[in-house]
Image (cartoon, helix red, strand yellow):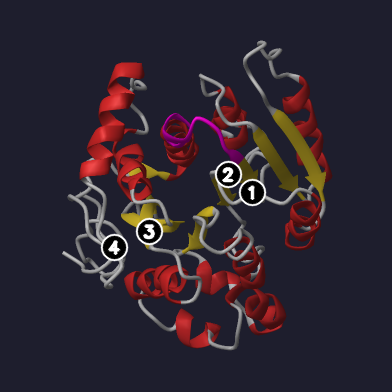
Amino acid sequence: MPKADDGELLLLDVPQTERVKTFKRIENPIWTNNKAKLIERYLYYFAWVTHHGTYIDGFAGPQRIENQDMWSARLVLANRPRLLRHFFLFDIDAIKVALLNQLKLDQPPLTKKEKRSIEVYQGDFNSNIREVLKAHPIKGKEATFCLLDQRTFECDWSTVEFIAQHKPAGHNKIEIFYFLANSWIHRAASKKNKPAMRRWFGNDGWEAFLALKSVARTVAFTERFTKELGYKFAYSFPIYGHDSNGGVRTMYSMIHASDHPKAPVLMHRAYQRAETVKEDKDQLELISRQAEKMKPCSDGAS
């Protein structure tokens, strides 16, 4: 079982607040090269439960151009049945935008029953998302998943706030899956990088935040989604790798924030089963019913 950098044995990097409930110990940890499979599997469950939905990917180009088999946008688009209807794919890199446009062109024709649109945008996601959602506002009842798989500090906290506040009051917020760096965050932060760090963290507290130990940092940042942004549920899922000495460590965490009670249960299942064969229709119906019974409570931790 992987351990944190300070030797603490982890269940999940989950904050123990009044808004969350812990799950079972992780038996099948996700490694860095399989993160895209986790995203793919969760969206498979997400679309089955919602039977519609919008997918927003703020940093959508392949993480590694030479390894497009582990490209989240490609894997999510390949999920069947094709229930997600709208895709908004962003990247600042011209080469990756070209790959996104080719990915769009390579999609098989839709059937008469399928409805799907794919839009690709080049430029800074922090400004582009505001323009796109102004032109294409997300309806209150539209199930929406936003992947913020940034490269350390590229996503401003004000952008996360904007996404969380986009939907009208009384509706579930846009679901967010957020990349939080861990093992290299101190190397990436520097005095010359202060303006970017302030935009990323949202205030001048980033230096005190970085002074925390790795698990405490993850807990503190995850709690921001409930305490500052008002999400009902927020959990972090560790992504493991090997350090220079061959040891196991948490390279980064993916923070999942949602208002839907089934979402944390399904994300936990996706984490446990990301590398297994996908469930069929009958199994998915059973999973959905089980998720309803297992839904985490928002009024007490356990």
Disc 1 and disc 4: Cα gap in Å? 40 Å
Residue, disc 2: 142
CB under 8 Å between discs 2 and 1 = yes
Please tell me whether mark 1 sits on a helix, a strand or a loop: loop
Disc 3 packing (10 Å; few <14; some 14–19; many ≥20): many
Along the viewing direction, whichever of 178 and 260 lies nearer the viewer: 260
- Horizontal arrangement in the rendering, residue 270 relative to residue 90 (left or right): left
Please tell me whether mark 4 sits on a helix, a strand or a loop: loop
Q: Nearer the viewer, mark 3 or mark 4?
A: 3
- The magenta stretch spans which residues? 46-54
Q: Earlier in the sequence, mark 1 or mark 4?
A: 4
Residue, disc 3: 236
- Horizontal arrangement in the rendering, residue 130 relative to residue 6 (left or right): right
Which quadrant of the view contains residue 115? top right
The image shows residue 51, relative to residue 246, as above or below, that is above
Q: Amino acid at mark 1?
A: Lys
Q: Which mark is residue 4?
A: 4
Residue, disc 1: 139
Please tell me whether mark 2 sits on a helix, a strand or a loop: loop
Disc 4 and disc 2: Cα gap in Å? 37 Å
